[in-house]
Image (cartoon, helix red, strand yellow):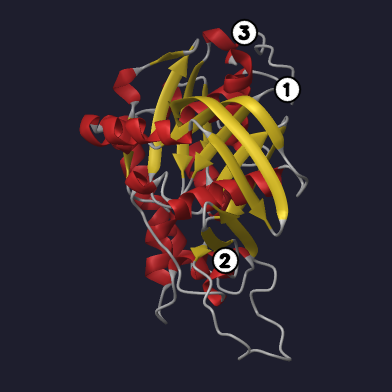
Amino acid sequence: MIDSNAIAYDPGYANSKTGIHGKVGFIQTAISKPKDIGIAASGMKSIGKNVHTVEFDGHKFCVGPGAWYKGDPITSMDYMSITSPARTAAFYASLHITNEEQPISMRDATLMVGLPVPLMRDALQGAVVTDSLRKFKRGHRFTVNGVEHFIEITKASKLAQPLGAYFNWYYDDELKARAGAKHIEVAILDWGMNTLDLYVVKGNEVAETYIGGAEVGMKNLLEEMNTDGRDLSELDAMLRDEEIKPTKEQIEAWVGACLAEIKKTMPDLRRFGLVIPVGGSVVVADQELTAALMSKRANVYRVKDPITDNVSGLYKFAARNS
């Protein structure tokens, strides 16, 4: 993708995704406050030695896989905390990773933030979170693993997260519209850690009838698998590393719950020109979900990376409008 002064941020519960300088990346949204143990671990390596240390404005956090080994995990399924110091640390760590751990120096940047559909459908909560995004409009000076970064954000806007997937399909890497794209009715199924977000767009215009969502994300599957009291972030990492694996029955029940919610908002998937599944849950339930959608005669469009597809589109949209 082309370089620009745009920044994209998709603050997921499982992964914090960012786009900057024409690149996209992510880090697991596992955050802790490092525990001071003095010299108690002298002569030993830390299990969490590869965790990213983020420092800014007097705060210090550990972010990424293994953060739970550095201190007590900070967990929040509440988007009201999107600009809290802990979530800000995840934003900074993701930018550091996305920029290949090289120093960032950017002024007059435009930030585009993706928000979940259920939140944006709630007028009161949506208004509160939208107002909180103004806190991003300032100079951000921070270090990640000792690497210094500075970003000045002068504009901050929001889009529903599934629109990122639509715009990533609609525009190519040179930000040109796909031939004939404006005539195709596209259904987005954004299935993440906490929510399933449903959205339908045609020619950059939204079909309100087919906007919906429900809390049937991967959190539900992990809670079903959690038999030893581990934190969800740790279970998520174990699932990614294939240290644990859901049973066939657990996957089928979880996909079934997803399909039931889809049917409430989109009774017949055949009507859509394309159906695009994205999100971390799609990675886990890939074959089962695709087979189920195709059995309903959906024209499934498989994206290259379901985890970063939304943030790629958010970046393209911000770059075109910055």
Q: Position of residue 218 (x, y in %)?
A: 44, 56
Q: Residue furthest front?
A: 58
In depth, the one of 142 and 172 nearer the eye is 142
Residue 15 in view: no
Instruction: Please tell me which of labels 1 and 3 falls first in the chain.
Output: 1
Q: CA distance from mark 2 to mark 3?
A: 40 Å
What's the residue type where badge 1 is placed?
Answer: Asp
Residue 237 numbered tag = 2
Name the amino acid type tagged 3.
Gly
The residues bearing labels 1 and 2 have C-alpha atoms spaced at a distance of 31 Å
Q: Nearer the viewer, residue 301 or 271?
A: 301
Left or right, 102 with reference to 128: right
Residue 83 figure quarter = top left
Q: Secondary structure at mark 1?
A: loop
**Which residue position is annotated with label 1?**
173
Mark 1 and mark 2 residues within 8 Å of each other at the beta carbon: no
Q: Quadrant of the C terminus?
A: top right
Question: At x 31% / y 37%, what residue is drawn?
Answer: 118
Residue pictured at 46% horizontal, 55% vertical: 86
